[in-house]
């Protein structure tokens, strides 16, 4: 199939280098290819079981060169692919050309759920253990339908500090702790403006929102309480994550050193 791809869509290219276009790496030269060639490459990759590397392709090509007539439908001479007549299943070339024009059918695999028990496995040479209890194993077989209709417009989500304080109070009652509400009451929100910062009591989630705070200012608590609060506002959802920036960490250390000295 790969030799057919080269012969049909990339004539003149060295077959020894075919692995470079089949391993999925976005080489800049792909931009210069025709739309038909790019689609054919994508379909060929879908027909492969795994990305194609240099060593694998070199081995396949060497094995192909050793095939005696009338098995191969191509011969390789000085970097050129030459079609040769064969009486053994001559329709193979037409089938390969058709495959390059059609992606493979989807393979539907039903999920397999682990029964209750203790499972041990290795990750990065480290042993791990996880236990699946009976209740979780039973719930795993209950399918939850998803609404696959895309939502083009999403209105902003506004959450006030008072709402988050109320959520943190509920978390303390549920967890038997006293730190969530205490920390939330100490958090102060300021929005970046053209003139500096402006105090606010409302957090607006609209697209991507960056939040910056000193070490121990309550960033993790804010995100945890905010996630808990939004979980109770289904079907609206917001995706939250935190990324530690090296400059922010340096600022933490500088602030700690200033307080300490």
Image (tube, rainbow, N blue to C red):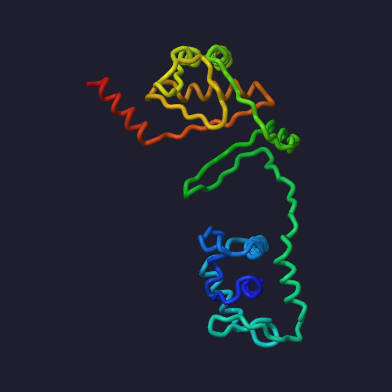
State which quadrant residue 73 falls in: bottom right
Q: Residue 250 appears at what percent x and percent y?
A: 32, 32
Name which residue lies at 50% across and 22% down: 222
Residue 243 higher or lower than 107, as above or below: above
Foreground of the two, 3 or 227: 3
| Residue lying furthest front | 194
Q: Is residue 222 left or right of residue 217?
A: right
Q: Is residue 138 left or right of residue 159?
A: right
Q: Residue 164 appears at what percent x and percent y?
A: 55, 16
Q: Is residue 169 left or right of residue 253?
A: right
Name which residue lies at 48% across and 15% down: 200
Residue 27 higher or lower than 254, as above or below: below
Quadrant where the C terminus lies?
top left
Q: Residue 7 appears at what percent x and percent y?
A: 64, 75
Name which residue lies at 53% across and 17% down: 202
| Residue lying furthest left | 261
Name which residue lies at 73% across and 60% down: 104
Residue 52 higher or lower than 255, as above or below: below
């Amino acid at each position: 199939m790969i030799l057919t791809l080269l012969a049909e869509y990339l004539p003149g290219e060295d077959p020894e280098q075919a692995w470079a276009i089949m391993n999925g790496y976005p080489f800049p030269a792909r931009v210069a290819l025709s739309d038909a060639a790019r689609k054919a490459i994508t379909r060929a990759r879908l027909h492969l079981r795994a990305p194609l590397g240099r060593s694998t392709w070199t081995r396949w090509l060497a094995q192909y060169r050793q095939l005696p007539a009338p098995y191969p439908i191509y011969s390789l001479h000085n970097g050129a692919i030459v079609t040769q007549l064969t009486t053994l299943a001559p329709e193979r070339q037409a089938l390969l050309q058709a495959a390059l024009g059609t992606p493979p059918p989807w393979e539907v695999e039903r999920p397999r759920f682990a029964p209750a028990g203790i499972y041990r496995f290795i990750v990065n040479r480290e042993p791990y253990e996880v236990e699946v209890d009976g209740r979780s194993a039973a719930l795993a077989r209950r399918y939850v339908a998803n609404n696959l209709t895309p939502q083009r417009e999403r209105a902003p989500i506004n959450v006030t500090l008072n709402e988050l304080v109320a959520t943190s109070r509920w978390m303390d009652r549920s967890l038997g702790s006293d730190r969530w509400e205490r920390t939330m009451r100490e958090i102060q929100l300021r929005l970046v403006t053209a003139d500096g910062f402006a105090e606010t009591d409302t957090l607006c989630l609209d697209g991507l929102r960056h939040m910056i705070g000193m070490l121990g200012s309550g960033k993790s608590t804010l995100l945890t309480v905010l996630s808990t609060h939004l979980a109770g506002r289904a079907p609206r959802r917001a995706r939250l994550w935190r990324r530690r920036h090296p400059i922010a960490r340096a600022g933490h250390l500088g602030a700690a050193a200033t307080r300490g000295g």
